Image: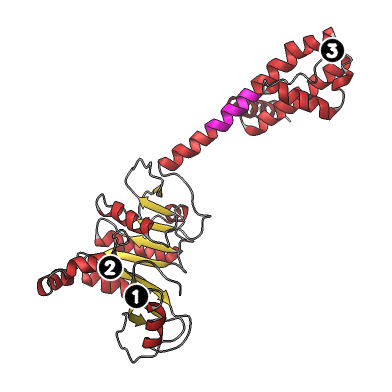
Amino acid sequence: MGRSGLNALLRRLYLAAGELHPGVMLALLLVHMTLGWLLLGWAGEEALARPVDYAYWYLTTATTIGYGDLSPKSDGGRMIAALFVMPGAVALFTAALARFFAGVAGRWRRRRQGMGDYSEVDGLVVIVGYDRERTPRMIAEITADARAAEIVLVAVDALEVDDPTYRFVHAASLTAPADLRRAGVANASRVVVYAASDAETLAATLAVTALNEGGHVVCFLRDPDTARLLNAHCPAVEVVLTPTVELVVKALSDPGSSRFIAQLASHTDEGATLYATRASGEGDFDGHAARLRAQGAVLVATCAPGDPCPRFDLQAPVRAGDRLFYVAKARVAA
């Protein structure tokens, strides 16, 4: 190794020591422990000659606990302990604690600022996009559901999140694959996309479906033409048009219906709510309705896999795997 290589190595060691690198801390601890053991052995401290006894005494000294059952007996051993072992052990222990708590605080601060990584977590509910009024209500509805899972919010806004009900990921854009992966989109069980504009929602939904293959993706759109375009390219995505003109007209035609529909869609109200489950076996509508009614639920519609809309045909057969829509105060088993 030439002089330039040696200088580079010494510089790296100096920087690592200045940053309290774990490897450097461990090396300093081992060197200090070994030197202390050798010096105490030279001073004739037989009670600390066994490595296990010495390690026990060293750690109790470093943590300032000092039980007193083991200690140097000779004058030389006591001076070595007072001038070399104790100052070094306490300093190394304090530095290790400072390093540990600094790391914990740093991770907490990064998560609060949206720099956390949830890519290894399965079954998340990911909300892509942030609206000051709608998103908190959406989180409250998801949390109130019996199937509530850990929630991750992806937003381009610099939010200071201190809410235990969800995690926050700060993204450069709602279509950035790296940020979506960091939010756990690839392994999420459910994803909701609601951006500031339909164009942004459309782009974010396409980015989500490129990463997530097995989860249920729902997006909120305002323009029916954009909804048709998305359904043409991603038929598995469930599109919700908001605000819906149909609800307004329904409220005009049947007074009180808008409040009833809102109750069916809400998990936070005390009344009954609309749920969906899978049929566990074949049968007819009446048979499945009777089984659900026995559990306090009312069957209202069925939907076969691949059908775009639920059907209200009471004569249609129900096959295993069909989706059953029912109204109940709580979710029931399949």
Closer-to-camera residue (255/214): 255
Of badges 3 and 2, nearer the viewer stands 2
Label 3 sits on residue = 73
Label 1 sits on residue = 326
Q: Earlier in the sequence, mark 3 or mark 1?
A: 3
Q: Amino acid at mark 1?
A: Tyr
Placement of the N terminus among the 4 image quadrants: top right
Q: Is residue 235 left or right of residue 123?
A: left
Crowd rating for badge 1 (residues with CA inside 10 Å; few <14, some 14–19, many 20+): many
Residue 140 visible to an observer of this rendering? yes
Q: Amino acid at mark 3?
A: Lys
Q: Is residue 100 left or right of residue 169?
A: right
Label 2 sits on residue = 264
Element carrying mark 2: helix
Image point (66%, 29%), residue name: 25
- Report the span colored magenta: 93-102
